[in-house]
């Protein structure tokens, strides 16, 4: 098993699911919506809607009016405006959007993307001085600046105004800029604080546009906003859901020559409508590679160019940089992975590694891979001349920004989000930082290893539901990402029909059967030996669903997230019954599996009358299985256990523990017995209600 716990959501009621189906939502999609707490047609339709009418007024952002006023004055007076971005995808798309927008407004605009190695993250005093020398009188930051208090003061001393637009966490006093637009400001009442940097930048462009022309502005820049939002792993609910959904449609028909060429180079040009997977795994890494390899300006040029030849050349160069990035990343990962395997104490409760000569642009990705493999927050520090620049990635809900704030006395600077952040530190402080971070992670976990859990949306009770039509219906839930993950399903007791390792032994491919249906399954980064697979094995499977096409044939494929040997159904129901006896709270679905009907008691009584013809019967496993068959129902074993317990409570049967095992005697009370009033029956009905 890859995950320690499979956490299955409580399913919605069949009545709620049928209500959703009557509105045109396919059954599998309706079941997922119910399980995710959207059982009413109104709430489900509100979630599924993703039109432009879902966008909030940009002037709800605090200081937006001040930002617009200062930028309009610069445009009217012919001032030179600098758009100051960041070297990741969010920052690059933000810089492209605002540079192009202000230029189209007639502005004198220059763009500046800091060098990851030379400048570091965010506003830089030397860069501000350079921009002043170029005649810049107004700097507008995008995706950075919220912690640049000293740098903004430096700009003031040079007579340069600064407008900050950012989405990172605030700390301490805000910079004394002309405007600070950030939905995460503690005093900002904007209804959706989860915008990416490019989302805030788009809001600025919309605020600078008359309301009747804002839709046109979105159509010009929506694909940039979608790419930046997905790349920065922002929550895809509310406004971001609409922004990304509409933006991906625009990306499919983008007029930007560089983006078209990049889609072609990445092998995604044929996609009808790109998905978040297209962006996250194909487009974003190639744009990000430019910033990671110290050439972020190339990515900005590719997005801005109107020349198809130049766009194609730059796209090819980004792909080459990405290949170089992958090679360097692999070397660092393998070194660190080997180190952690030799010294496992370094991997708990947090990984804090430092090294000379590591490429600063790739250690964040290495941190992400190590965090996933070792199930703990990871901090990677690049050392040079006694100073370190670190990138960190979270795991298990550990808040990185809050943790770095608590270690601020050991750091020279820090910034970022809950899940990903950066910091700078003197080499001499690293041991104390490692100890402090380990202590904070231990407090977060209560001293226990971080549990590796997977949240499962729905158990598939019959494979007839797994059709291409139903899988395609799940596309209504897209775009998928944080806050709206791709649905994960559970299938119990599937039998392995055939299997083989593919991809040089790196992946496992199987055919499994249940309910008379044979399904294809693929498990990446696993093989038959490590999973203990053999023909005829019965497995519980957790998976996402996709459509596989081969030689013109389309079929459903299970993309496995995890698997485990399947216990017998009787074992599962025995365990559920024991939970009931122990007083555990059961879900409505679980209670429904155990609650007997009146005819179940009647059939079981007739069975026991025949079995106890000699006066008593041994209550072994074989008897219980025969009794369950007498009830002849789905989940009958668990209901049989409940029936026997209720009959015993109400005096219909009497059981004794003897040397040869438990023995059941039939009793025939003179008074009428109301089985529905038994404590266990009332308890089950209470769970159902």
Image (cartoon, helix red, strand yellow):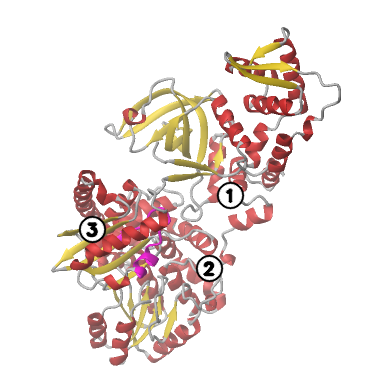
- Answer whether residue 397 is magenta in the image: yes
Label 2 sits on residue: 192
Alpha carbons under labels 2 and 3: distance apart: 37 Å
SS at mark 1 in the image: loop
Distance from Cα at disc 2 to Cα at disc 1: 20 Å
Residue nearest the observer in this picture, 506 or 633:
633
Q: Secondary structure at mark 3?
A: helix
The answer, for residue 19, to whether it is visible in the render is: yes
Observer-nearest of 577 and 655:
655
Q: Residues within 10 Å of mark 1 (few under 14, many from 20)?
A: some
Region rendered in magenta: 392-406
In this rendering, position of residue 266 left or right of residue 593 = left
Helix, strand or loop at mark 2: loop
Q: Is residue 86 magenta?
A: no
- The 10 Å Cα crowd at callout 3, few under 14, some 14 to 19, many 20 or more, is some
Cβ–Cβ under 8 Å for marks 1 and 3: no
The quadrant in which the N terminus is found is: top left
- The residue sitting at 75% across, 24% down in the picture is 601
Labels 2 and 1: the sequence-earlier one: 1
Residue that label 1 marks: 36
Point out the residue furthest to the right here: 671
Query: Looking at the image, is 321 positioned above or below residue 512?
Result: below
Mark in the foreground, 1 or 3: 1
Determine contact: label 2, label 3, CB under 8 Å. Answer: no
């Amino acid at each position: 098993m890859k995950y320690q716990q499979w956490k299955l959501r409580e399913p919605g009621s069949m009545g709620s699911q049928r209500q959703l189906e009557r509105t045109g939502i396919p059954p599998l999609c309706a079941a997922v919506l119910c399980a995710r707490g959207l059982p009413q047609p109104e709430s489900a339709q509100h979630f599924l809607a993703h039109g432009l009418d879902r966008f909030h007024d940009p002037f709800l952002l605090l200081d937006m009016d001040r930002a617009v006023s200062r930028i309009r004055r610069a445009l009217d007076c012919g001032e030179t405006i600098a758009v100051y971005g960041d070297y990741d995808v969010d920052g690059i798309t933000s810089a492209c959007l605002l540079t192009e927008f202000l230029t189209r407004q007639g502005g004198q605009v220059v763009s500046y993307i800091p060098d990851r190695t030379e400048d570091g993250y965010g506003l830089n005093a030397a860069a501000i001085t350079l921009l002043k020398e170029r005649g810049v009188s107004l700097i507008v930051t995008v995706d950075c600046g919220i912690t640049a208090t000293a740098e903004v003061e430096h700009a003031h001393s040079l007579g340069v105004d600064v407008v900050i637009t950012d989405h990172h966490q605030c700390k301490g006093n805000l910079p004394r800029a002309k405007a600070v637009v950030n939905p995460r400001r503690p005093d900002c009442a904007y209804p959706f604080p989860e915008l990416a940097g490019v989302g805030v930048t788009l809001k600025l462009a919309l605020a600078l546009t008359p309301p009747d022309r804002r839709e046109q502005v979105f159509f010009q820049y929506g694909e940039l906003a979608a790419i930046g939002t997905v790349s920065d792993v922002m929550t895809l609910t509310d406004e971001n859901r609409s922004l990304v959904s509409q933006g991906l449609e625009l990306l499919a028909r983008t007029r930007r020559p560089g983006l078209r060429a990049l889609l072609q180079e990445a092998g995604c040009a044929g996609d009808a409508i790109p998905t978040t997977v297209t962006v996250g795994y194909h487009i974003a890494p190639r744009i990000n590679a430019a910033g990671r390899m110290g050439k972020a300006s190339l990515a900005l040029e590719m997005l801005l160019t109107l020349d198809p030849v130049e766009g194609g050349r730059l796209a090819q160069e980004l792909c080459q940089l990405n290949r170089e990035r992958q090679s360097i990343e692999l070397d660092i990962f393998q070194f660190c992975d080997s180190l952690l395997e030799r010294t496992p104490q370094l991997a708990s409760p947090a990984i804090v590694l430092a090294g000379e000569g590591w490429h600063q642009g790739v250690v964040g990705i290495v941190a992400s891979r190590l965090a996933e493999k070792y199930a703990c927050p990871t901090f990677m520090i690049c050392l040079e001349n006694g100073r370190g620049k670190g990138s960190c990635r979270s795991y298990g809900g550990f808040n990185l920004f809050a943790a770095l704030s608590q270690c601020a006395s050991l750091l020279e600077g820090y910034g970022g989000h809950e899940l990903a952040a950066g910091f700078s530190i003197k080499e001499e402080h690293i041991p104390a930082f490692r100890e402090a971070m380990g202590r904070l992670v231990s407090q977060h976990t209560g001293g226990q290893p971080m549990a590796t859990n997977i949240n499962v949306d729905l158990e598939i009770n019959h494979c007839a539901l797994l059709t291409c039509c139903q899988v395609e219906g799940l596309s209504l839930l897209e775009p998928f990402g944080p806050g709206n993950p791709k649905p994960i399903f559970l299938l119990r007791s599937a039998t392995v029909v055939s299997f083989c390792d593919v991809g040089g032994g790196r992946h496992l491919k199987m055919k499994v059967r249940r309910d008379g249906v044979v399904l294809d399954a693929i498990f990446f980064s696993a093989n038959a030996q490590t999973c203990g697979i053999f023909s005829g094995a019965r497995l519980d499977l957790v998976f996402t669903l996709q459509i596989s096409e081969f030689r013109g044939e389309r079929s459903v494929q299970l993309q496995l997230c995890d698997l485990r040997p399947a216990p017998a159904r009787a074992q599962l129901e025995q365990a559920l019954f024991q939970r009931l006896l122990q007083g555990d709270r059961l879900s409505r679905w679980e209670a429904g599996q155990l609650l007997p009907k009146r005819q179940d008691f009647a059939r079981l009584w007739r069975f026991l009358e025949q079995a106890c013809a000699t006066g008593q019967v041994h209550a072994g496993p074989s008897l219980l299985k025969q009794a369950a068959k007498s009830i002849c129902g789905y989940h009958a074993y668990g209901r049989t256990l409940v029936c026997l317990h209720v009959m015993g409570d109400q005096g219909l049967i009497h059981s004794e523990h003897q040397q040869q095992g438990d023995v059941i005697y039939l009793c025939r009370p003179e008074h009428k017995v109301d089985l529905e009033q038994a404590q266990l029956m009332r308890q089950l009905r209470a769970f159902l209600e």
